[in-house]
Image: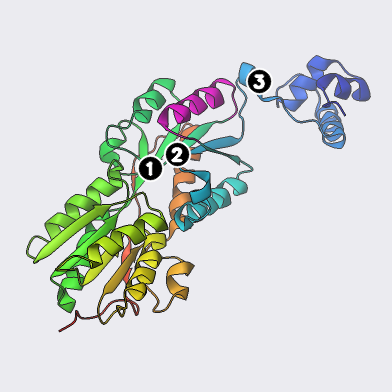
Amino acid sequence: MRRPTIADIARQAGVSKGAVSYALNGQPGVSESTRARILAIADEIGWRPNSAARALNGARANAIGLALCRPARILGMEPFFMELISGLEAELAARSCALMLQVVRDHDAEIAVYHRWWGEGRIDGAIVVDLHMDDPRVPVLESLGMPAVVVGDPSASGSLVSVWSDERSAVRETVQYLAALGHRRIARVAGLPKLMHTAIRDRAFSEAGAGLESCVTVHTDYTGEEGARATRRLLSAPHRPTAIVYDNDIMAVAGLSVAQEMRLTVPTDLSIVAWDDSPLSQVVRPPLTALSRDIPAYGGHAAQLLLSLIDGTEVTALEDQAARLNPRGSTGPPPA
């Protein structure tokens, strides 16, 4: 079946196509009774606005974009992004606004997506995640003039509005807690070093662990496989760490499996902390000590800021709640 057109509505309503256009776009030029009749017919025959035509007349798309530079096979395993998207969706649904999601291979592909979405009038703005140091997306979005909100530290977001949380305080709280338990050899299995939040955590971890016997960071790609490989290397060292902090829950669970594989008891022989709590962290045994924050609320706040920008409201960067340590059964004093 072909897509219903304005001409179809005009024919059924017995009016001109111009009158239909006025009615559908909320413009003066038709009576309220005629407008109501036209809208009813449009709904009855399933008419929907054409995005290209909407772009030409400057109408809203009622959609925002989110491009994720992550392998699709990994994305479904990342509780952080699933919870962030749920928060975005909850806020957008309340405003009858859609979320356009696309997985891309790199930043060049992501930038091309923004150009296409914005040029074709498919979106009214975008949420930007995984901020890099000297991120090439920032100047492009600034030049496009497209409303955009960055989920990341404002130090690297240029003139774009950001939603962020204090990574440094969460790192300090974790290291201080482990040190108070008596740990002097602490390691961290981190994410990608080019990410801004990884770099911030790197510096904070090094500073917080300055007085310890050893404070080592190993970078990975966030996958369970890489997390497990990094854990084996750390636990095979002559002076292995007595506590390991992981930058996501997937790697922490993989690290727990490796410890059990190497006949180490958690937390007697090794303490484990996961960044970003999740149901996965809580169902393993022992349940993992984790850094917890309300990620759906984080996504909701980003959506609120973006919708305000789209409406023309002046907004500023929003510091969200920092992650807080939630001790569970995977941490305890180091072996004597």
User: Along the polypeptide, which appears first: circle 1 or circle 2?
Assistant: 2
Q: CA distance from mark 2 to mark 3?
A: 26 Å
Amino acid found under the numbered disc labelled 2? Cys
User: Along the polypeptide, which appears first: circle 2 or circle 3?
Assistant: 3
> What is the span of residues highlighted in magenta in the rendered image?
104-122
Q: Is residue 309 above or below residue 168?
A: above
Tag count: 3
Q: Secondary structure at mark 3?
A: helix
User: Along the polypeptide, which appears first: circle 1 or circle 3?
Assistant: 3
Q: Is residue 286 above or below residue 322?
A: below
Amino acid found under the numbered disc labelled 3? Ala
Residue 157, quarter of the rendered image: top left
Q: Which mark is residue 130?
A: 1
Give the crowd class for mark 1: few <14, some 14-19, many >=20 residues within 10 Å.
some
Amino acid found under the numbered disc labelled 1? Asp
Comparing 55 with 237, the one in front is: 237
Q: State the image coordinates of residue 308 (x, y, percent, origin top left).
A: 48, 38
Residue at image point 44% right, 42% down: 305
Q: Which mark is residue 52?
A: 3
Give the crowd class for mark 3: few <14, some 14-19, many >=20 residues within 10 Å.
some
**Main structural element of the magenta stretch: helix, strand or loop?**
helix
Task: Tell me the mark number nearer the camera, choosing from 1 and 2.
Answer: 2
Q: State the image coordinates of residue 82 (x, y, percent, origin top left).
A: 51, 54
Residue at image point 50% right, 23% down: 115
